[in-house]
Image: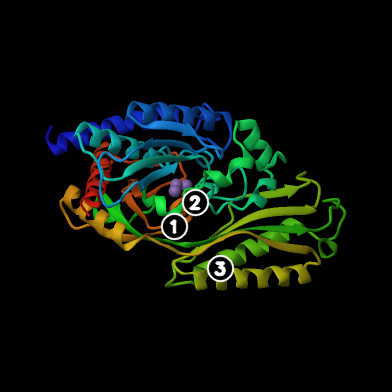
Amino acid sequence: MTPVATARALGEKAQRMIDALTAISASPDHLTRLYLTPEHKRAAELVGEWMREAGLSTRLDAAGTMRGSMPPGRAGRSGNKALLIGSHIDTVINAGRYDGNLGVVVGILAVETLKARGVALPFGIDILAFGDEEGVRFPVTLTTSAVTAGVFDPKALDITDDADITLRDALIAFGGDPARLKEEAYQRPSVLGYLEVHIEQGPVLERAQEPLGVVTAIASQSRHRIRIKGEAGHAGTVPMNMRHDALAAAAEIILAIEAIAKKDKKNSLVATVGHVEVMPGASNVIPADVRFSLDVRAANDRARQEAVEAITLVARKVDKTRHVVVGVETMLEKPVATCGARLQKAIGKAVTTVQGEPARSLMSGAGHDGQSMAHLGEFGMIFVRCRAGISHNPAEFVTIDDMGLAVEALVETILELARQ
Ligand code: HGY
Ligand code: MN
Ligand code: MN
Ligand code: MN
């Protein structure tokens, strides 16, 4: 088949696989697939089937990652190392269908394509379908890739979800095994590197009219929980100057967060409050207790840290002026994760070959499992154009042709590494 036909046929197969995964959701109305849920299990089993059809041996690991493995096809300088290829099959709430899922589908199709071409590689390939990159159910992110990279903090097992279920209990109920997480980690010398194909989740490639791009680094990121304790009271009787309104205090802090982030001009600083809980939540009761999430990112660690310090100062001020108690808890901090030079170069060559024009390099504002996998060695990412850069939204869209080109680019990257 001609390369274009191959890309088209691969894109059509990718679309069928994406659509099959999209149908596995907590809701018939939209795509929501959280970590360690029955829909996570069903999606992992479907991905496992595809992996086996591609000739990989599979197992669901103790953390809930579906792993597909292929040994080296021939001797070579890489010895018994494995090239890890992965992404995540968990989603946000009311998600787009390509975020994460596309990377797993493209990885499986790339292995199928290499086998169809009779390519014998001097290294193994492991495909990893991570179960928890988004960190939506539990307020920690990259859980399963952290286990894979040997950097999982067991204290996270005691973190609870909104239903007060601990990560440990959810893992056991899922059929995972908290006691075996440590042994699930790869050893650094056995890993050739980690590659992930992912939608850009931003507008750069579409604006440049290029289907693919090379990721240079993943932004510095931290997540926090802010809790405000005020005093419940009767909405009709407590005078305004005598209130300790936790939600009004939260509103003042949230607007200050937005103002701090907007002031930044050169560090791609962004700050988001995405989840707010108001207790007791009755319309005629002054809010007594408010908890909200805070997500801060920047192109460098210093800019992010300075923003968190400025936000914490505002929280202290509101604590005093409104006579409430404001607590700021840091749930995670991830420094900038830089993609390996060798993988960037191999991806750049492959993308240039496949798209027929020089590959563009760009930073990722979104977090990815590569932030964990960087602990095992080099990681590299291929970005795929998505319509208007929309993501974490059911309007997320990638064309069939671009998906086919993504498979071709991953195949070319693997062949480039095999030639080294
Ligand atoms: O939040 C993120 O950046 C990623 O989509 N989990
Ligand atoms: Mn993602
Ligand atoms: Mn995401
Ligand atoms: Mn990711």
Residue at x 78%, y 67% (from the top left corner) = 322
Residue that appears at 34% across and 26% down: 53
Please name the residue that numbered disc 1 is placed on: 374
Q: Residues within 10 Å of mark 2 (few under 14, many from 20)?
A: many
Q: Amino acid at mark 1?
A: Ala
Front disc: 2 or 3: 2
Amino acid type indicated by mark 3: Ala
Q: Position of residue 354 (x, y in %)?
A: 19, 47
The residue carrying mark 2 is 149
Q: Identify the mark nearer the N-term, 3 or 1.
A: 3
Tell me if the residue at label 1 has its CB under 8 Å from ligand 4.
no
Please name whichever residue, 375 or 124, is drawn nearer the observer in this view of the structure: 124
Circles 3, 1 touching at the beta carbon (< 8 Å) = no
Label 2, label 1: how many angstroms apart (C-alpha)? 8 Å
Amino acid under label 2?
A: Ala
Q: How many marks?
A: 3
Cα distance in 3D space between marks 2 and 3: 37 Å
Instruction: Tell whether circle 3 marks a residue whose Cβ is less than 8 angstroms from ligand 1.
Output: no
> What secondary structure is found at the residue carrying circle 2?
helix
The residue where tag 3 is placed is: 259
Rendered location of residue 93, percent (x, y): 54, 40
- Disc 2, disc 1: CB below 8 Å? yes
Q: Position of residue 8 (x, y in %)?
A: 21, 34
Residue closer to the observer: 417 or 249: 417
**Separation of marks 3 and 1 at Cα, in angstroms:** 33 Å
Residue situated in front as seen by the camera: 222 or 96: 222
User: Quadrant where the N terminus lies?
Assistant: top left
Name the side, left or right, on which 328 lies relative to 237.
left
